[in-house]
Structure formats: C-alpha cells, structure tokens
Amino acid sequence: MNDHGLSLGRSAGIRDGRLRDGGATGAGVAAATSLDDYADLQRGEVALWSSPQLADRPLIVPRRAVVTDDRNVQPSAAPAETMLTARGVTKSYRRGEHVIPVLHGVDVDIRGGEFLAIIGQSGSGKSTLLHLLGTLDRPDDGEIYFEGHRIDNLSPAGRDVLRNRHFGMIFQFYHLLPEFTALQNVLAPLMIGNGLFTYLASRRRLRAQATELLDMVGLGHRLRHKPRELSGGELQRAAIARALVSQPRVLLADEPTGNLDQGTGEEIMRILRTLNREQKLTIVMVTHDAAIAASADRQVRLVEGRLAQA
Amino acid sequence: MYKYLLCWRYLRSRYIALACIISVMLGVATMIVVNGVMEGFTHKMEGRMHEILSDISFQSRSYDGFENPEWHMNRIRQIVGEDIAGMTPTVNTPALLSYEAGGRYFNQTVQLIGIDERTYDTVGDFGKYLQHPENRHELSFSLRDGGYDVRDHQEEAGTQIREEMKEAGWPHRRRVAQRAAAMRVAQPAPITPDDDLFQARAHGEQAANPQAAPDSDPNLKPNTGAILGIALASVRDQEGRDHFRILPGDDVKLTFPGIGNPGTSNRLGIHEQFTVVDFYESKMSEFDASFVFVPLQDLQRARGMIDPTTRIGRVTSIQIRLKEGADLEAVRDKLRTSFSPYYYAIQTWRDMQGSLLAAIRVETVVLNLLLFMIIAVAGFGILAIFYMIVFEKTRDIGILKSLGASSQGIMGIFLSYGMSLGAVGAGSGLAIGLLIVTYINKIAHFLGWLTGRPLFDPSIYYFQTIPTIIDPLTVGLILGGAMLIATAASILPACRAAMLRPVEALRYE
C-alpha cells in the first residue's frame, strides 16, 4: 500500500540532521505520529487508522462510537484501494420552515493519491459535500468511508481526531486564526492534537516541522507575521502549510483560489499539484472554475445534488 | 496548549475584557477594605471592652446592693474557685456630676462606681487608662503634684498635645484658689442663684467656697478623690484637640441616691464634694463620657450602705476576672444555677455589650452581602462581554473545530479565559485593597483635606486612627468567591461556543 503520509514527512524537509538537533526522539515525525495513534488505539479512546499497517490490526471501537453494524467496517462496502468513499449521501438544510435539499444521493470514490476536482455552480452543494467528507457535518442519509471504515457515524471525539490527524482542510477565506502568527497558525493542529506536556516536550521538533512547511510554501520569512499582515496568497499558503502539518492522508480544498487573483491562484494550484505529484497526497478540491479544475487528475460535476462525470 | 495560548492572546487583545477585570478588581478591593476596617474596629472595640469590663459581672438587681460581700465572694470561690483569677466588690449607682467652669454650672448624668483600690486592678486593666504615670503603676485617689501626661500615652504618635494637662494637679488647684481670692477682692459677691443653692447644702468644711480665704488650708485641702471619664471633662474638636473644662485639682460635686425606701430611710440627693485626681480614658466614648470612679468605702459611707453594728458595707456587684482559658459561659451558667436570678444578674462582658457586638456583626454580614452583590454584578458583566466575544469569535471556533479541536477544548478556552479574568481582577483587587488598608489613615486624611471635612472624625470615634485588620481567611474567601463568580459567568458563553457546529461557525465570512 502507499505510504505517502510517511513520504510527505520526509520530503517536507524533515531531514535527519534536524531531527538529531531536535533531541533524543530520533524517530521520524511520521513514525511518531503513528505511535501516538497507536497509543490512542491501545487506550481505546478513538478508533483510527493512522497507517495502512495499523488498519490490518483489529479495530478498537471507541467507547462512544456509534459503529454498531459490523457490515459497515467490511472492506467490501467500499473498494479497498479507495481513500474516501461517499455512498448515497443526502443532505438538506432547514431554513425556518423550509427544508432545502442540497444533496440527493451522491456517490463518489476517491482513490489514494488522486487529485479530484468537484465542479459545481454556487449553491450546488459542493461545499456541503466537502464538509461531509471532512466530517465537519453529518449526512442525513448515506455513508462515508475513509480507508474502508465508516466515519460519518463516529463519535465526536473520533471525528475530532480524524480531522486533526488525517484530513487537512483549506478554505476559500483561508480561515487563519487572527490572534496567532503564521507559525502559530501552522502549529495549531499540533497543539490541538497533543496534550500540553507532550506539546511542550516536543515543541522544538514540532516548530522545526512547521517552519519547514512554511519554508516549503515560500513563507519562511513571514513566520512571525499575523494574518492581517499577510496578503491573500500568503494567507492561503500558510493555510496549506497548516493543513499539511499533521501529515494528513487527504487534503480537502474548498475553493482554494476563489478569493485570489489569477496569478496568485495559479501559484496555489502549482503547490497543490506538486504536493499531489511528488508526495502522492490525495486531494479533493471543489471549485466553480473549470479552468482551475482542469489541473486536477479527474473532474466530476455536481449538478442538482448529484454527481456526473465531467 | 492552544487553549492557553488562545486564552492568553484573547486576554491581551480584547480590551473589552479590561472592563471585566476592573469590575472584579473594584469589587474585591472594596470588600477587602471594608472587611479590614470592620474587623479592625470590632477587634479593637472588643479588646477594649474586655480590658475595661471584667470577665463576669455578678450584679445585684437593685442599686441598694446586697449585704456581706465577703460571704458572696467565698460562695463564688466555692463554686468556680479553680477558674478565678481575681475578684473585686464595687458599688454602682447613677449620679449627677456638677461643677463650675467658665462661670457657669455644668450638670451631667454619670455612672458612679465605687471601687476598691487594692483589688480593682485584679479584674481589669483599669490603671492602664489613667493619665498619671504613677496612677497607672499603683492606683491612688490622692491628688498628684503635677506630672500628668500631656500626650496620649496609648497612641504612638500624631496625636495633639494636651497643653492644659501640663499644670494639672496641685499647681492647678493652687492657681484656682488664688484666682478665686483675686476675684473676691475685685467683686465682693459674684455668686449666682445656682451657687447659692449648692452652697447652702454643701458640707461647710469641705466646700470649695470662693468666699473663703485662698491661702487658708481648709480650702486647698482636697476632698475625696474622683477619677472622671475624660469625655466628661473635655470636648474634642475636629482636629482631635481636647479642650478641658476641668482638670485634676478641680472640685466637682456628685449627687446620688441613698438606699432603702425613698423619702423615709433613703435620703435622695446626697451631695458629696470630690476632687478630680485623674482622668480615665478607655477610648470607648460611651464609657469615657459616663464613668466616674470614687473610693468604695467613701461611696458606701455616703450612701449609708455600711451596717452600723457590723461595720460591713453593702456592695452592688462583684467583678470577677477568670484565669486564662477558662470557659466564660460555663462559669456564668454555674453561678446562675447557684444564685437566684431574682436578686442577681450574672453576665459575661459579652452579654453586657451583647447588643453592640451583635449590631457590629450584623452590619458586617449585611455589608459583605451587599458588596458580594457588586461582584455578582461584575459577573453578569463578564457574562455579557463573553457572549459578545463568543459571537465575535464564532469563525475562530469553527476553524479550531475544523482542525480537530474538541467541544471540551473550545469550552476550556472560554472557561480558562473567564477564570484568568477573575484571577487577574481578584489579584489586582487584592493588591489595591491591601494598599488602601495599609495607607487608609493617610488616604482618609487626604480625602478630608480635599473635601474640607474630615472623613474620620476622632471626636466621634475616640480612636485617633482607623484600626484595620487583614484576616487571611476572609481575604481568601473573597478571592475565591470572585474567581468562582467570574468562572461561573463564563460557563454559559463557553457552552454556547462549544455547541457551535463547525459548519455553521465557518459559514460566517
């Protein structure tokens, strides 16, 4: 199976020299993350699959998890090689007394290492679909699978860990925390994912990791700047660095260029393409712009709440 | 980690939070100051009362008193002997104090107390409050030849000098007699009708008769000594300076009842001439303005309390001082069961001043309740401001959730934010409160100067300065309460923040 989580860690510039500087931890960052996950699994706190190797082990069901049906976790429900799968997903919003249907049974399979663009008009529900895939919201009906495991009915704690460690998200409006500097924004997922003492103990290593990522997106000179001091393109690059810092399996991008001029937008797309090609990062991007979507491997179109091949 | 970092950032960047901090700070500072002053006052008052009053007062229900005090004291010793450190018999009676000053007569009601010089000091710190150093050392009812304190010996510094006390005692007495003689030469008959009345009834040989020769011995010879409460003899102005109407060396007249059936055996309105030998200053204005002490036997004789056959005098009360650590209430209750309450009132010093002490206690409780309301108001301020901040931070909450922050984590941000606001507010309130308490007298002085009206009028309180005590337990409770309120006020906004769904939170652009 692929191991791009690990490869990202390496290619993002966590060089051995740096690591030795970081202290006695010695092991690669990605390995450390896996071990953290493994510890979580041992504690039975959350059911997660940090790496394909771990996925082979018996799944420990989270205490508060709602996974009741064994059939759901059977790989047969979704093709094993797919990273993310949606099956018959429907979603509607309630606005006052009106129920506004957004998605009527969406099926989509996203393979590992794929760069998928979901194209749709504004209001077609493409952002909603992305939120459902990223467990920011729950579907009314249907199922969502991540690496063959059903995730839409996970406990809140399980979904929190999923978002923290396995999904990276970038948004049209960047959504950086205004109180934090660029570096702190990138560190935020690591602060959230680690306890106070774990974080403080490995702070130097994690900062180095975040700095590397900011370097990679070309913001090495802007570490201490607050979001209000950064341009749109810089904000989005910082957001990408933040999405990548916990070495996610999937990057979910919601109109990443929607608020940028053409040149800056293309720069962002270049970064995404590089990530996809060189580090085999699975990317799901929604956009209304067919030109932007063209740089993806595969495009699907969301029309009237259903997906069609573009 | 992000919780504390964000909480810290919010604390530093939201100036509106300053309003919360200030309101908590003011509440805490006020509570600390008020409690410090109230406790200082209570403590000083109780201390003084306890020093002035004996532990237990064994009192007759009649001003006529009871016979044979020795028998009563022996009986008391039999019952609670092991707890007793000292006992003294006294005679208490209401009386009228009369004297001439500045050409006119003053008549004041007083509480006249006949005390036994030998034993009275064993039940309280009576001597400590006298103005002549030798009287403080060993009580005597004879007039001293000057040497009275011109400075309040109970206060360290800063009090006004009592210039008039410089010549108190024999020098004063001599000068008054000389002046009277000079007056008599100039104006042969300067006698007012009032004077006439008193002259007629006075004991001829002891009266301070202005018509008598100034240098003749009978006039200079002092009468029985009397110790006056200092506020009977002086008035204190707003600067805290005392102005004396009479001084040690002056003669005063006391009018008091005898015993028995009025009109027959009881000669109402017995007049006795006394010479002031010292002042009593307990700093309890109530006592200082009403007590007059005279020797026990002289009072017994004047009131006809001495049995002609046995030569044993009646007394109205026995004052008892207990040993350190003795149980006041238990001793009182034991005595109460042995002596009929029909004739005897047996009270501890707390019982005697019960209403005053209870009033202070109630006042403290009510004040604290009201002040705590202030902090509660601050709590609602925090609630409102936090709700605002949560609303403002909706997008940030969505971002954090999209990054995997748990609802508990989001709640933690706002709870720790509230707690740190409470802590900062309580901490600065503590600092300000302690500063005010430390410099309260200077502040009161300054405010008095600023407003032109003294904040703390020593002529009313009889304390020259505002007493304060900081009780660590009270301070701890105030700080804890303030932080609890601040935290409690942030619970609701924190819950709201935690319950926000990430998608909804992110929708705000």
Image (cartoon, coloured by chain):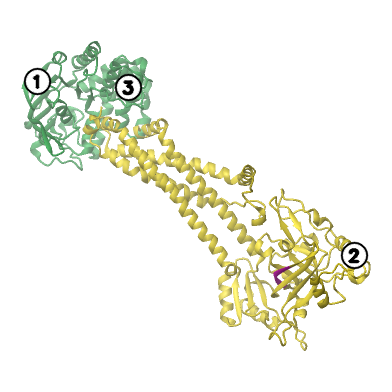
Chain colours: A green, B yellow
Part of the protein shown in magenta = B107-113
Q: Which residue in the protein does label 2 denote?
A: B187
Residue ranking furthest to the bottom: B309
Secondary structure of the residue carrying tag 1 is strand
Secondary structure of the residue carrying tag 2 is loop
> Residue A281's spot in the image, x, y percent?
19, 20
Placement of the C terminus of chain A among the 4 image quadrants:
top left
Residue ranking furthest to the top: A263
Mark 2 or mark 3: which is in front? 2
Q: Residue at x 68, y 83 (%)?
A: B71
> Residue A221's spot in the image, x, y percent?
36, 15
Up-down: is B306 above or below B453? below
Up-down: is B47 above or below A54? below
In the rendered structure, which amino acid carries the disc numbered 1? Val
Q: Which tag, 1 or 3, sits closer to the chain's start?
A: 3
In the rendered structure, which amino acid carries the disc numbered 2? Gln
Q: Quadrant of residue B461?
A: bottom right
Q: Chain of mark 3?
A: A
Q: Relative to residue B147, is residue A125 drawn left or right?
A: left
Q: Which residue in the protein does label 3 denote?
A: A210
Q: Chain of mark 1?
A: A
The span from disc 2 to disc 1 (Cα, nearest Å) is 130 Å
